[in-house]
Image (cartoon, rainbow, N blue to C red):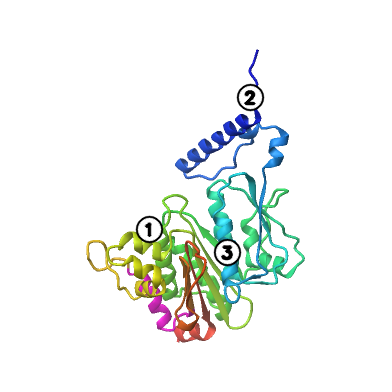
Amino acid sequence: MKAKICRSERLRIAKRGLKQHSLKVKRRKKVHVVPRAYFSNISMYEKEKLKPYRIKCPVDFTIETGLEKSIVFLSRVRNFNGQNYSHVYLDLNGIKKIDIVCIVMLLSVVNHLSSRNISVVGNHSGESISDNIFCKSGFLSHMTKISGGKFTSSDEHSLIVKIGTDKANPDLIGKTNAKAVKILTGREFHYKKLNSMVGEMAGNTMEFAYSHNKHYLYCYNYTGGDEITFVFSDVGYGIIDTLRKNVGHIINDTITFKDKLAVLNGAFDKKYGSKTEEVNRNQGLPLIKSVNNEGLVKNLRVLTNGVYLDFDDNEKSQILSNRYSGTIYVWKVSKSILEEYLS
């Protein structure tokens, strides 16, 4: 006679199978959908207990006026561990204010969860102002409909590019920038300083991000006028945490915790060397700051490890109550900057 297995034992076996599958996926560095076979031994009653992890987006989903609450929301999404829930459900209803920066950050976090084999779904009616912005930003072109198929991209003036390789891919960065500057000038040309700045951001991501699923998102967004907004995002360790790993003997822990803003400023001013006391071989951060200082881009800001640094207005820089792991840059390029560059 075949022995019966209690429900708790069947659930434990299923979870063990899911864990083994996740480990295999990480080794292959590929993203797969979790096979439903792992849950075949769970009764319908037990399946119903695995409800979605529902997270509501804040009403003000912008970095200008809703930064703290936006970081709390994004951190909750990113830190989801999959226990006792079937998937993540993003409740986007009720958004009154939203910007391209938070849209790109959300997409970065969703991609991060996908790399961990975690399903993410959300509501999208296509009727509200926020839904319209999601469509125009290109966010939905990276998503899949529940019924199957892809959303179509509706606006060539907004482009989000995902790069997920072990290389920075300067050719794609250059082509993306060339398309952006054409919107303002009518000419598609290579803006070399912008290409170099973004190339350094991408290089840092490829060198210091997690060993698996390295990727970053790069975006330009034009909503009218004579300026274009650019956003660069990754979900790696972040600048400050990377410094603590690589030059911890130089940065005193007390200073790091009490004045992370000063540490971040110092990184962009090239104040820290390597573990071997050599000159810092990574020229990226000082180069990024110099492009802004030379007026070749404007309004450069960076958010990383709970610190928000505004390069043009130090009074807007702040240490946040909640930390955002990873790094996100945002800046603008105006028509007048491009015309001066071409003259």
- Mark 2 vs 1: CB contact within 8 A: no
Occupied quadrant, residue 100: bottom right
Residue depicted at x 48% and y 56%: 215
Q: Label 2 vs label 1: CA separation?
A: 48 Å
Pair 2/1: label in front: 2
* Nearer-N-terminus badge (3/1): 3
Residue that label 2 marks: 5
Q: Quadrant of the N terminus?
A: top right
Extreme top residue here? 1
Circle 1: residue type: Glu
Residue that label 1 marks: 207
Residue depicted at x 54% and y 71%: 179
Instruction: Tell me: 172 left or right of 285.
Output: right
First to last magenta residue range = 283-299
Which numbered tag is attached to residue 72? Answer: 3
> For residue 247: magenta?
no
Q: Residues within 10 Å of mark 2 (few under 14, many from 20)?
A: few
Q: Residues within 10 Å of mark 1 (few under 14, many from 20)?
A: some
